[in-house]
Each structure stands twice: as structure tokens, then as C-alpha cells.
Image (cartoon, rainbow, N blue to C red):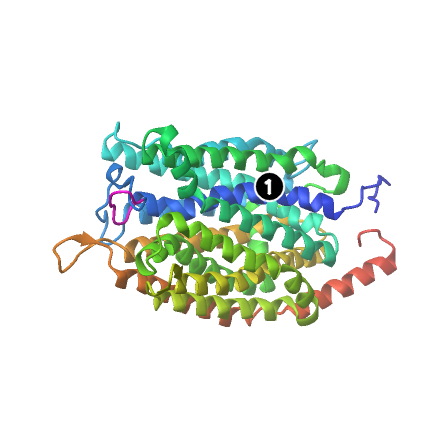
Amino acid sequence: MQNQNDRTLKPITNKLLWIFAVGQFGWSLLSGIVSTWLVHLYTGNASEGATNGIFGSFITQAPILASLTLFGLITAVGRIFDAVTDPLIASWSDRSNFKGGRRIPFMKAVAVPFAAVTAGIFCIPGAGFSEAMNDTLIFVLLMLFYLFMTVYCTPYNALIAELGDTQEHRINVSTYISFTYIAGFSVSTFMPNLAGMLEGVAGSQAAGIRLAIGIMCAVASVAMLVPAFLIRERDYIDSKPVRTPAFRSLIATFGNAQFRRFVYSDVIYFFAVTLFQTGLADFETNLMGISSDKTFLLTVLMTVVSLSLYPLVNKLAPRFGKKRLIITGFFVYAGVFLITALSSDAAIGSVHFFGIVVAVAAGIPMAILGILPQACVADVSELSTLQTGEDRSGMFFAARTFAMKLGQALSMLVYTSMTVKRLTSDGVEAVTEGQYRAVAAAAAVTCLIGAVLFFLYREKEVLGTIRSLRSRSASSGDGTAQ
């Protein structure tokens, strides 16, 4: 493979793609810590020995505006913030011409601050500050969390399309990063177990939790730096700065009809999945009667099931198409959420029946939707590059990241509003089982809507046009086809 200056590029190998995938483990671990434990630790029904609501006394619990809580408002503001920063970072990356490449320098610069801020979200607010001060600190730290995640993830995700130079590499890199994403998220659910081990050293349960999160954040920072230091971007990618300004590039990205069709369902997907993930620890402890230190075991089971299906997904995708499998994943997820809404603490001996069913069933869509949607974005990005001559991979993945964050923000807004403490018949303020069941049911309904919307995406048209343009480029001998 050569560029116009006859500079030979190194071949992209699966080993390189695995090195790249380690970075996903790092940022998914940080994301998992926040998405799984933020609401759980700062809100909910606090009780002796439990982790739910253990930091709740530090921040405002009552609704601030109508039924909107502190976290609901923060995430809403955060998404507005992201609406500006996502395209700006994407355009900055697309237009950059650093010696180290268009993507890697961003990842290298922000990995450690990203991890430090994540730890700070759980470690800085405390009894030494007023409630208003803690609210402010949480707000500032979460804004920085969203910003640093954008600065790392937007260039990182753009590399998916650039390192996925063939359909085989595209599916492979999507598979590898899906594996490391699940691994990172799974490790984040181990937090209560690690905290329990460290409680004696730390001196209290709260201190053990903070120490456990700090250790996980340190591990995440190292993982994020692995591809940043081991991949020399310009050795593998002939990247040229894009000249299109940020918001014109963003408008052109959403002007792509196929991308819009994909994003419609993607927003719904992230809304539904985040709604489920945010409440997962609460569903398991409050509906299924599982202690918080055993939730990790169910996550391990879910992960094992998902990973065991990766080879099957890789084989089925070329045969049946990514679109059909993704729609199937939506429907299965909807079923999982519905089962959760109807679950109870039924057990066979020491085995929690519904916990096992949910963990096994959820592994199926996790495998499908963890791999294939990113490959779809890479397809659309490549088609745009072939049609326009401009490689705006950063903007395409930033737009998808924005869809992800929009879905997550709406989810947090809905979850925190639906789980506001209410006065029970016993005269105690608490979140009821009915509220948790309503959240799971809402996730099921929205997942079905996402499946319907994804029928609009025309995968055959995208891939057919790519093959046609590649063939035309190769026959003309202009050297742009890889």
C-alpha cells in the first residue's frame, strides 16, 4: 500500500488491532464506573452495610425542578455541552496534522486526566463540604468527565475506520474492541467486591469504595495509553488534514441519508441500554434479591455468554448481513428488559433464577450490538470518503458518539425522574419495586422502537456502492483504493 509520495505503509495486522483494542478497555472501564455506580452510590435507599445511596447524604436528593433531580439536570446540561464539544473535537482531529498523526496525540494527552477526573467524581465530594458545594463539585467533575471522554473517544473511534482498511479488518477490529469494551464494563461491576477486600485497609466501607475506584481508574489510564504509545499512526495510515470547517462538516455528516437512518435507531438503542445498565444493580438487588457483592458474578456470566458468541457473530455477519443481526439483537434485548420488569427474588437453592436468565439472555444482544453497529459507521464513513475524497472519519464517529451521549443523557434524565423516592404505605420515603419495574418496561418498549427504525438503514445499497466505487478507482489506477 502506497501513498502519492510512494511512501510504503506498514500492513495492518490483527496484532496491531488487538493493541488498539486495549484502549477501549480503559475508557469503557471509566464509563462503566460512572454509568453503573454513580446513581447507585449517590441516590437510592441507603441501608446499613449496603452500597446503595452510601454517598447520598453529600448531595441534594430532593427534585430540583418539577421531578428532575440533580443528576437528571446535570446530564441534560452535559448533553448540551457535548453538542458543542463533539463536533469541535472531531473537526480538530480531522483537520490536525501533528507529527504523531491525526488521532494518537489526542489520546496520549488526555488519558491520565480522564482517569483522574473519573476518580474525583467519587472521591472529592464529601462531608467536609456543604451540600451546595458538593453539588457544584459533582457538576464540574462530570462536565470534565464528558469533555475528556470526547477528547479521547472521538479520535479513538475514528481509527476504527482507518485501521479497518478491509471488510475483514473492519469486522475484526469491531470484534476486538467489543471484547475489550465488555471486559472493561465487567471489571467496573467488580467494584463492590474489590472495595470489600480493601475495606480493612481503607478503614471504612466508603473509603474502601473510593480506594477501589481509584485503583480501577489507574488501571484504566494505563490501558488507554497502550495504543497511544505502541501505535505509530503515520506508519499505517496515510492521513491528510480535512479542510472543511467543523459545523459544515457536521452538517454534511448528518446530511448523509444512510447515516441518519442508522443514527435514528442508535439514539434509541443507547437510551434503552443505558436505562437498563444504570438500573442493573438496583434491579438485581431490589427486584431479584441478589446482594450487591454477587452482582459481579452475573456480569461475568453475561460476559462469558457474549464472548462465546463472538465467533458465531463474525461468521453470520457476512452471510446474513449486519442489518438483520442488529435488528435481531434489538428484539432479544427487548425481551431481556421485559423479563427484568417481571422478575422476582425466586431462587432454586442459592441460585437466583431471574438473575441467571437475564445474564444468559443479555449475552446474545451484547455480542451482536457490541460488534456490528461500529462496523456500519465505518462502512458509511468509507462510502463518504470514496464519494467526496475527504476522510471525515472523526466527524462520523463523533456524530455517533453524540447520538450515544444523547441517548445516555435522556436515559439518565428519565431514570432519575422515574426513581425519585416516594412516601410508602409504611410512611417511609423510598424507591418502590413498581418504579424499578416501570424503568425496565420502558427500556423494553424503546428497544422495540429502535428495531423498527433500523429497518430504514439500507446496508446492501451502502456496500454495493462501496464495491462499485472501489472497482472504478482500481481500474482507473488512481491509487486511492486500498
Q: Nearer the viewer, residue 88 or 451?
A: 451
The correct choice, above or below, for 211 with respect to 471 in the image is above
Callout 1: SS: helix
Residue 37: x and y in percent read 38, 45
Count up the numbered dots: 1
- Can residue 242 be spotted in the picture? no
Residue 108: x and y in percent read 60, 33
The correct choice, above or below, for 315 with respect to 82 in the image is below
- Where residue 142 sits, quadrant-wise, is top left
Q: Which kind of residue does numbered mark 1 sit on?
A: Gly
Q: Nearer the viewer, residue 284 or 268?
A: 284
Is 134 part of what is drawn in magenta?
Answer: no
Q: Nearer the viewer, residue 55 or 116?
A: 55
Q: Residue at x 43, y 36 (%)?
A: 213
What is the span of residues highlighted in magenta in the rendered image?
A: 43-50
Magenta residues, dominant SS class = loop
- Can residue 373 be spotted in the picture? yes
Q: Residue at x 67, y 68 (%)?
A: 316
The correct choice, above or below, for 437 with respect to 83 in the image is below
Is 294 placed left or right of 311 in the picture? left
Q: Residue furthest front?
A: 349
Q: Residue at x 41, y 65 (%)?
A: 337
User: For the residue carrying disc 1, how many other residues have a C-alpha within 10 Å: few (<14), some (14-19), or many (20+)?
Assistant: many
Is 336 placed left or right of 111 in the picture? left
Residue identifier under label 1: 23
Residue 293: x and y in percent read 39, 47
Residue 299: x and y in percent read 47, 53
